[in-house]
Amino acid sequence: MDPLQTSIRLPLNCDYFLKNLRFERCSQEESIAWHIRLLITTSFGECAFDPEFGCEIWEHEFEHAQVSRIWIDKMAVQMKSMLERYEKRLQKVDVKATVTEEELRTESDGRSLVRVQKSLRIHVTGHIASTNEPFYFKDKIFLSPFATE
């Protein structure tokens, strides 16, 4: 791996550090993907260093009963703006968002329970600024209550 195109892998692996006296590395693509996920799963005001760091989705977490196309488009625009501000390693960012309903099956007291939960699917495309290589990211977040896959 080219050291200029790598980043320190998070979360930090202290065992690795103590054995090798250096931090474990990851690719720039993986680092960008983890940063995007951090931005999406952080609510405004959660980070003391920047109260605007995070995603607007959590401002409306319990208002999703009637998810509309307007809400979905608003989330995509807000996420694109957030990435343009906080992820400078990407250029030509485009964000698409869709909401689906999924059946989730769980076991409780020997019974199989099924519940339907809305999920927000996020697709980010762009180019890595330093190499102009294409970048793709997709994630799914379950809405109210919040969960990730």
Image (tube, grey):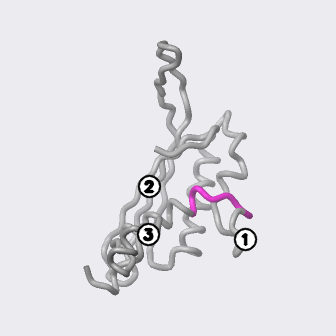
Q: CA distance from mark 2 to mark 3?
A: 32 Å
Of the two numbered discs 2 and 1 on the same chain, state the one appearing first in sequence.
1
Q: Residue at x 52, y 19 (%)?
A: 108
Residue 93 screen position, x and y as percent: 46, 69
Of the two numbered discs 3 and 1 on the same chain, state the one appearing first in sequence.
3
Secondary structure beneath dot 3 equals helix
Secondary structure beneath dot 1 equals loop
The residue lying toward the viewer, choosing from 68 and 24, is 24
Nearer the observer: mark 3 or 1; the answer is 3
The residue lying toward the viewer, choosing from 89 and 19, is 19
Q: Is residue 47 left or right of residue 86?
A: right
Q: Residue at x 70, y 73 (%)?
A: 50
Q: Which residue is mark 1?
A: 48
**Amino acid beneath label 3:** Cys
Q: CA distance from mark 3 to mark 1?
A: 25 Å
Which quarter of the picture shows residue 40?
bottom right
